[in-house]
Each structure stands twice: as C-alpha cells, then as structure tokens.
Amino acid sequence: MKKLVEKHPLAIRWFHWVNFPVLALMIWSGLWIYWANDIYRLGWGTTTLYKFFPQSFYDATHLDHKLAQGMAWHFLLMWVFFLNGLLYVGYTLVSGEWRYLLPNRHSFREAIEVTLHDLGLRKAAPLVQKYNGAQRIAYTAVILMGLGSLLTGLSIYKPTQFGWLTQGLGGYEAARVEHFVLTIGYVLFFIVHVAQVGRAGWNNFRSMVAGFEIEEVPAGAASPRLAQREPDTQA
C-alpha cells in the first residue's frame, strides 16, 4: 500500500530554495571581486601546483574587469542571504525542527556508516529517518559556515570600521583566506549535495519540492505521517 508521508514543512522548503540560488549568485559575484586580487594558489615558494584561477578561466567565463559590478551584487545578495538565514534559524527554534537538524551523540557514528554505505564499502543500509547523522552534521555545519562568511565578509569589506572583528579573525589577510576557504566549502557541499539527491532519486527530490514522499506501507502498520513527527528521543 502506498501513502503520502509528510517530510519537509513549507517554510523549510522555502528557505532552502531561496538560499540555493542566492548563495550560488554570491559565489559568482565573489569571483568578479576576487579577479582584482587573485593571489591564492596551491604550492610553495615559486612552485605552483594549482592557481585559483588561471587567466584561461577568466577568458572563458568573462569574469574579469567587473570589480565594481561584483561588489554591488555581492553586498546586495548578502542581505538576502543574511535575512533568509536568520529567518531559517528562527523558524527551526520556534517550530522545534532543530531537533531533527542538530547532531546528537549518535550522529558521528551514523555519518561514518552512511559514508561507507555510499562508497559501497558497507552493505547494510543506514537507519531510515528524517535526517541521518551525515545530514545533521552537514546542515549544521553549513549554518555555521554562513555565520563565518558573514563575519569574514564584513571584516574584509570594512576592516577599519570593524577593526575589532578583523583583528579577532587574525587580521585582514587571514580573514580573506578564511572567506575564500568557506567559499570552497560551499562548492564542495553543493557537489556532494546534488550527487546525493541524484542518488536518492525522484521521490527524495519531490519531498523538497512538494513536502511529501510516497512510501510503501505494510498493511496494518502505524501511519508514517504520525511516526514522522514524533520527538527525537536520541537528541
């Protein structure tokens, strides 16, 4: 027997779909800014193993000579990113959704099991739940990364006005490195997140669009809709 099972509330879906394109556009506009002083590379001394980013990248994407435009878009989108994140955190606190999102004492063990299963090194499937341990850790980390991006962004945008913040982050150069590393973290999160969504299939993707999944329920079993909303006793 098939049943519709509630998974994601409307607010969670709204915050998710607002944040995804906003963050992507912030990364894009950030590259316009980075072009003006693209100093980061992997290497040592005069030896460069990889440069972020070679001139061929700018030639192909036409991201060069757009510093002012990039700054204007970046700081405009920053307010949308900040307000959306603030509303998201506020909603999870008021609604109790934080119980499903924050890592608990089992999350790190579950995250290892999920990773091994996804890599094909563990046959047993992880426990089916609203958010597994890997998801709890990843989603909480992204929230903390968002806060870090806001603080490091302010410190390099206004290093004099926010001198106390800039110094607290290790100085201007350190804050800029931290901001750049966080951006790489978002890109990696995007890649893994999209890959996981594709691997999970259409039913999982639909749950973030429509808010429900279609599940096979044995005859006589308790309603999964009711079971889904039970308090997390492991937190």
Image: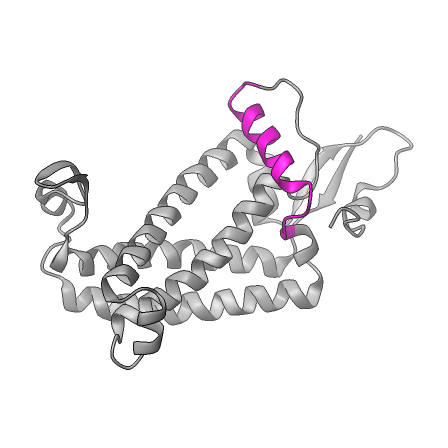
Pinpoint residue 198: horizontal percent, then vertical percent: 49, 33
Report the front residue among 144 and 25.
Answer: 144
Q: Main secondary structure of the magenta part?
A: helix
Pinpoint residue 100: horizontal percent, then vertical percent: 68, 51
- For this orientation, the residue located farthest to the bottom is 161
Residue placed at 31% from the left, 71% from the top? 166
Q: Is 146 drawn above or below residue 75 in the view shown?
A: above
Q: Quadrant of the N terminus?
A: top right
Q: Is residue 190 left or right of residue 116?
A: left
Residue 76 in sight here: no
Q: Is residue 73 left or right of residue 12?
A: left
Q: Is 199 drawn above or below residue 234 in the view shown?
A: above
Report the front residue among 136 and 152.
Answer: 152
- What is the span of residues highlighted in magenta in the rendered image? 101-121
Numbered disc total? 0
Residue placed at 32% from the left, 78% from the top? 162
Pinpoint residue 234: horizontal percent, then vertical percent: 76, 46
Residue 43 in sight here: yes
Would residue 124 be counted in the magenta stretch? no
Q: Is 61 drawn above or below residue 199 in the view shown?
A: below
Pinpoint residue 227: horizontal percent, then vertical percent: 81, 45
Would residue 104 be counted in the magenta stretch? yes
Residue placed at 26% from the left, 72% from the top? 157
